[in-house]
Amino acid sequence: IDRQVLSLYPAHPFVPYALDGVAWGLFLQGQDAAVQRERQKLSDHGRRWGIPEELARLNLYETANCLFNQKRYMDALSLYTRVASEHPEHERAPEARYRAGLCYYRLESFGQAVQAWERVEQDSAGSPVSVRAAWQIADTYFRARKYDTGIATYQRILDRYAAGPSEAATA
């Protein structure tokens, strides 16, 4: 249906949502390269016809996820950084910063990964993404054989999040 909408009504306001629907369908089928092509079509459509701002932000974030899944970490990092810097108050900004840390980690820039996750932990204190960031920090220290720092980080996690992420947000 989405492809029919696209071919019959290329300038219709529903076209961006149809493109997004095609991309999601391909994602669910595990076709990352095809997802990226559809996300690019959505970006191109936005430049030509315009798309709702929220959908444009979501498309940028999901394009980064697609690149990450293809192990194109530098390209994904660029888009995650863009999402976080251009839309710092957006609900996906903390997750984009967290995933930028994952990109740094996969690129073996461990210090930058830890810095990214520390920022997530500070900026989103108590949220589920901040807890995941703290775990990534501790694990990275352990993998680097910085056991004292790793242990201290795990202890900080226990102290801060023993009651769970939602409890820490109100403390």
Image: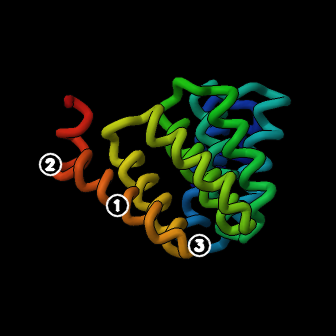
Which mark lies nearer to you, 2 or 3?
A: 3
Residue at (14% x, 48% y) in the render:
163
Q: Say which quarter of the image contains residue 83.
A: top right
User: Mark 1 — residue?
Assistant: 154
Dot 1 or dot 3: first in sequence order is: 3
Cα gap from disc 2 to disc 3, whole angstroms? 29 Å
Dot 2 or dot 1: first in sequence order is: 1
Crowd class of label 1 (few under 14; some 14 to 19; many from 20; radius 10 Å)? some
User: Mark 2 — residue?
Assistant: 163
Q: Secondary structure at mark 1?
A: helix
Residue 115: percent from left, percent from top: 61, 47
Residue at (58% x, 53% y) in the render:
114
Residue at (50% x, 41% y) in the render:
120
The answer to whether 82 appears left or right of 114 in the picture is right
Q: Amino acid at mark 2?
A: Ala
Q: Amino acid at mark 3?
A: Ala
Q: Secondary structure at mark 3?
A: loop
User: Mark 3 — residue?
Assistant: 144
Q: Is residue 66 above or below residue 126?
A: below
